[in-house]
Amino acid sequence: MQIGELFKKNLKYIELSAKAGEDREERVDSELPSIPDNLFIKCPSCGEKLYTEEVIENLNSCNYCDHNFRIGNVNRLMIIADEDSFEEMDKNMTSVNTLDYPGYLEKIQGYQKSSGITEAIVTGTCTIDGVKVVIGVMDSNFMMGSMGSVVGEKVTRAIEKATQEKLPLIIFTASGGARMQEGIISLMQMAKTSSAIKRFSDAGGLYISVITDPTTGGVTASFAMLGDIIVGEKGALIGFAGKRVIEQTIKQKLPEGFQTVEFLQEHGFIDTIVARKDMKKLLSRILILHQEVEDDN
């Protein structure tokens, strides 16, 4: 599939902007002035009112404080991959209701229709400034990026492809954790993906984990934190259990800023934090350096 075809889906902010533009045209012919819906959005970090079209131009980030609005995998690939370089893997792989969980398949079908994707992760190959990589991008718009059997299988197949073809691996994580509708099957994906990463590492592969907002639960406890290089997108929430659950369990108040990417970097769990506009540049530099070392060997 051409990247342009894939990107026609899931462009929420662009759709909002287009609607705002239509409303402005209608307002010209109206005797009563009005402000169209979605013309402005408020930054949840600094509180500034932002012109939607400017947010789009700034890669869906705040123009004042660089707060990153959540984006789907389609938008992410637009930012990271070279134009028309993305080739999707396992596109038609979908979940089945192994445990007969009531309403599960209907929920899956609803998310597929609204998002235009079949699962909470898209995997494939692409080039980044000419360097070929295997890439996976999770999408919190699909059942909050929860990891079930299909997500685990797609991640594992992507890792195995990178191992076989000796390509660097990049995974952008965004997840609420394991998918409760699949019970123990979803929890087993933690071991499955971690084992695949170990084999990839033993083969000498480079794995860059890019953690975006939010990354929690079983994804954090498995492949998200196993990268050779772990990059955090500015402002991302990272954790395993929820803050309230932890406090109730340990009977203590957690430190200020706990489970933020900045807190984790300070304590040695994250290698670097990058603004969205600088992400492709950083990944490109790492990949080119790695390629040069490989060529020398």
Image (tube, rainbow, N blue to C red):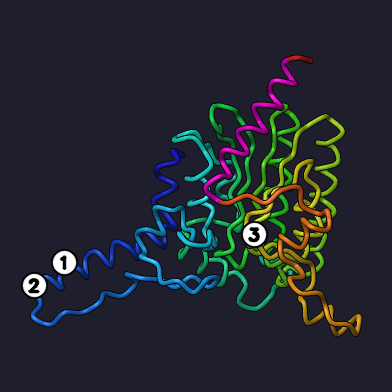
Q: Is residue 188 magenta?
A: no
Q: Residue at x 15, y 73 (%)?
A: 27
Callout 2 secondary element:
loop
Give the magenta range: 276-295
Q: Position of residue 9 (x, y in %)?
A: 42, 54
- The residue under the point 81% across, 74% down is 255
Q: Which residue is mark 2?
A: 29
Query: Which residue is identified by label 1?
Result: 25
> Which residue in the rendered view is the most extreme toward the top?
296
Q: Is residue 285 magenta?
A: yes
| Vertical comparison of 234 with 247: above or below | above
Where is residue 128 shown, x and y percent of the image? 56, 33
Tell me the quarter of the image containing the C terminus.
Answer: top right
Quarter of the rendering containing residue 17 = bottom left
Q: How far separated are the C-alphas under marks 2 and 3?
A: 43 Å
Q: Earlier in the sequence, mark 2 or mark 3?
A: 2
Q: Residue at x 61, y 55 (%)?
A: 138
Q: Earlier in the sequence, mark 1 or mark 3?
A: 1
Q: Secondary structure at mark 1?
A: helix
Residue 171: percent from left, percent from top: 67, 46
Label of residue 197 in the image: none
Q: Given contact means CB atoms under 8 Å apart, are the residues at marks 1 and 2 in contact?
A: yes
Q: Residues within 10 Å of mark 2 (few under 14, many from 20)?
A: few
Amino acid of disc 1: Glu
Q: Is residue 132 left or right of residue 99?
A: left
Between 266 and 168, the one nearer to me in the picture: 266
Assess disc 3: are there few (<14), some (14-19) or many (≥20) residues with their C-alpha within 10 Å of its C-alpha.
many
Where does residue 58 sit, x and y in percent of width and height? 44, 53
The residue that label 3 is drawn on is 174
Query: Quick one: 118 or 195, which is closer to the camera?
Result: 195
Mark 3: amino acid: Ala
